[in-house]
Image (spheres, rainbow, N blue to C red):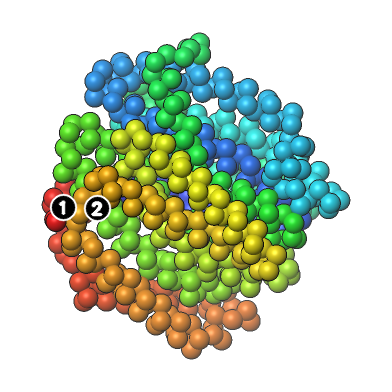
Amino acid sequence: MSLVKKFATVASGTLMSRALGFGREMLMAAALGTGPVADAFNAAFQFPNTFRRLFAEGAFNAAFVPLFAKEIETHGTDGAKRFSEEVFGVLFSALLALTIAMELAMPLIVRYLVAPGFADTPGKFETTVLLATIMFPYLICMSLAAMMAGMLNSLRRYFAAAIAPAFLNIILISVLGYAWYHGLDAHAVGFSLSWGVLAAGLVQLAIVWVAVRNAGISIGFRRPKMTPNVKRLLILALPAAITGGITQINQLIGTAIASAQDSAVSSLAYADRVYQLPLGVVGVAVAIVLLPELSRALKSGNLIEAANLQNRSVEFTLFMTLPAAAALWVMSEPIVRLVYERGAFAANHSTPTVAAILAIFGLGLPAFVLIKAFTPGYFAREDTRTPMIFAAISVAVNVATALTLFPRMGAPGIAVASAVAGWVNALMLLAVLIRRGHWGRDVPLLKRIPRLVLSAAVMAVALYFAEHWLAVRLGPGSPLVVKATTLLALVAGGALLYFVTAFATGGADFGMIRRNIGRKGSPPVG
């Protein structure tokens, strides 16, 4: 299967999940707006979600996958099964202990870490503590599910792991539909959503568990034991967890800072949902597929293939995300108005703030996706320390920038800090890959990048003038159908202009398409 076909397999599942996520957020915005319950739910959910990314997706897609792939190559399925059972025993025991400790300490954690600004708002702090207590066990389910998803990806069975997250949104949409039908108040909606998150974790774990069994590996529970393989995993996993979850660490910091201002937490969460669509469809797909493929190429000593995989991934990443970033920057307000502006969200007059945050996130989108394309170059070589150092620098930049800008700009200042930190991290990762000789110099790619940027800029200018020309049809007084059809027409026209310009300027060509669709690309040129 070609690299792009593998990207497409993962991206199709992710796209379904993110599209359903749009539906979920639209219903949530209508039901809760950017009010106190929305702030409480988003802050509470951010906490277990951050731990999930740190100790599950980040650590196991970075540390577990190369080791699991190595076991398959050297000891076959039996060795891979033994290794996965060793890890499962340690992981489950550690997660259970962590969950018990966090549940007992939840009031202190919310007060001093998650949302310190809520402590002075009557009822808001208590609601956040209760919602976080209900949702935190979701971490156990999702961490174990992430481990099994890593196994499936190493076995080149991508779809089940990609489709499982969609069930979170399916369940939460069902909860919101039930709440609307029965006329539940905001607090009842918040608590129902929290129980829905926990139920979704159990469903997602069941899906990947069955998929792993169908792949021929049945995992049994082993008494936790620090075997050499487990020790090696832990050595790699701690820095990998920090690195893989850097975006979530920055979001958690942003949430803590934003909790000092009413509606800021939920405004950031609604904007985050929109830009997560291109980030998830392209960035996550590239990261999930590239790591096991790159690990195999390096284990077999095929350095040309490894360099080529990295170049083709960046080529695909930029080709797809630059126009998305430009569109988010130019058209953020019509997008937010179409997706969210109804019910409690409209009553709170939240559109300008969320639109400003989304536009800034758009500028950081290419960096966030490139990070996911660059870090496998380190993880596949079992170097998780270097990206961790860069992640720590990125966090420092994020905190300093957010604390400086938030008093002046409010929630958009936190978005600026996140975008700046993302670009700092991406540039450091690339610079060290080049310095170490781990990045194959590809002259055609270097020539195409500025042409792709130019193509995205041409599209952005055209969309800017078209948006102003169609302002009445996109405005708040326009019917929903008119706004939707107008925005879709603008998106389609912008995409067509981008692709025509990219091919006309040489930013893209049919040779590039053939290289990405074929099983292997041509070797790096230089």
Classify 74 as above or below 327: above
**Residue 403: mark in rendering:** none
At label 2, which amino acid type do we have?
A: Asn
Image x and y of residue 147, in percent = 44, 30
Report, in whole angstroms, how far the alpha carbon at label 2 lies from the one at label 1: 8 Å
Which residue position is annotated with label 1? 524
Instruction: Name the residue nearer the viewer: 358 or 12.
Output: 358
Q: Is residue 122 shown left or right of residue 355?
A: right
The C terminus appears in which quarter of the rendering?
bottom left
Disc 1 is placed on an element classified as loop
Image x and y of residue 58, in percent = 46, 38
Q: Quadrant of residue 282?
A: bottom left
Which residue position is annotated with label 2? 311
- Residue for point 65% across, 52% down: 255
At label 1, which amino acid type do we have?
A: Pro
Residue farthest along the right direction in this orientation: 122
Image x and y of residue 280, in percent = 44, 52
Q: Is residue 225 shown left or right of residue 95?
A: left
- Residue for point 29% across, 70% down: 450
- Residue for point 50% across, 86% down: 468
Q: Residues within 10 Å of mark 1 (few under 14, many from 20)?
A: many
Q: Quadrant of residue 353?
A: bottom right
Q: Quadrant of residue 370?
A: bottom left
Classify 346 as above or below 469: above
The N terminus appears in which quarter of the rendering?
top left
Disc 2 is placed on an element classified as helix
Image x and y of residue 181, in percent = 70, 54
Q: Is residue 140 shown left or right of residue 386?
A: right
- Asked if labels 1 and 2 touch by Cβ distance under 8 angstroms, the answer is yes
- Residue for point 24% across, 66% down: 448
Instruction: Name the residue nearer the viewer: 470 or 59.
Output: 59
Residue farthest along the bottom direction in this orientation: 469
